[in-house]
Amino acid sequence: MKHLIHSLYYWGNVKTWIRPIIRINTKRYVEGMENMPKEGPLILACNHLNLADPALITALLPRRIVWMTKRELFDIPVLGLFYHLYGAIPVRRFEADLSALHKAQEALKRGQVLGMFPEGTRSLNGGLGKGYAGTALIALRTGAPVLPVAVWGTEMIKLPKAFFQRTPVHVRIGQPFTLPRVERIRTTVVKEGTEFIMGKIAELLPTQYRGVYTDAIPPKVAQDVGKS
């Protein structure tokens, strides 16, 4: 029953105000929508530039996304209730949060899409920052495929002027992949998985947004991706 309530609340908000606001106030350029699996467990891993990123992706993608969201937002009066009803998973950032890890794994067992920002926070300079281990750890423990997603242009969304203009935003969806299964999940394996995931996100971004992963992109891929 709880999951049904979350689903009804999610789609009710998406259809009544999230999608209309995104359509009115942004000019959207979307690539790779066909890469998103129509069903089954999936970890959506995306770079993070603006508070509007989750709303933008939520509005555009056809499947419900269970977002992992910083715990502080759940403590805000009224707004915190929205996140609870929305079905988001509260997480203590930059530390081992076993409760959040368990809830994330349960969401994937139910065949849902788990939304994550591996950087753990918004970029301060627009470039992709170092990824934290959580996304790779969950992918390794569950075997769920990872869908790399890149967004840019959202850093130009600033309130209140965003309500009076159409901001150009880009979303590029890559091919899903799975990390190699291992008998034992060691720190080095998680680190390698994290770098692989972040590299896949970086491949989708134009050069100026790749940040610390600029040098990780093969020259041919970097040339192709830079065309946007």
Image (tube, grey):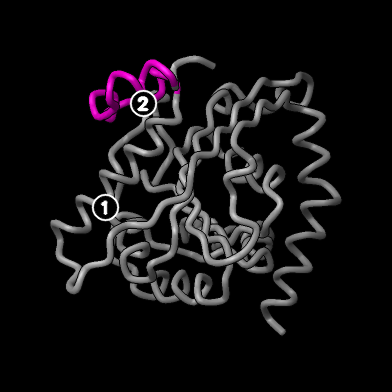
Viewed as shown, does residue 190 lie left or right of 99?
A: left
Q: As drawn, which residue projects farthest toward the right? A: 16
Q: Is residue 111 above or below residue 148?
A: below
Residue drawn at the location 19% of the way across and 73% of the way down: 183
Q: Where is residue 130 in the image (x, y as percent from the top left)?
A: 28, 39
Q: Residue sitting at 30 percent across and 55 percent down? A: 94
Under mark 2, the amino acid is Arg
Q: Looking at the picture, which amino acid does disc 1 mark?
A: Gly
Judge whether residue 60 is colored magenta: no
- Numbered-mark total: 2
Type of secondary structure dominating the magenta stretch: helix
Residue 86 is situated, as x and y percent measured from the top left of the image, at: 67, 63
Q: Which dot marks residue 193?
A: 1
x then y, percent, for residue 16: 86, 50
- Asked if residue 198 is positioned above or below residue 108 in the image, the reply reads above
**SS under mark 1:** helix
Using residue 15 as the reference point, say whether residue 205 is left or right of it: left
Q: Earlier in the sequence, mark 2 or mark 1?
A: 1
Q: Find the magenta span and give its range.
A: 206-224
The label shown at residue 13 is none
**Residue lying farthest to the bottom in this orientation:** 1
For this rendering, which residue is in front, 66 or 147?
147
Q: Judge whether residue 210 is colored magenta.
A: yes
The residue labelled by disc 2 is 210
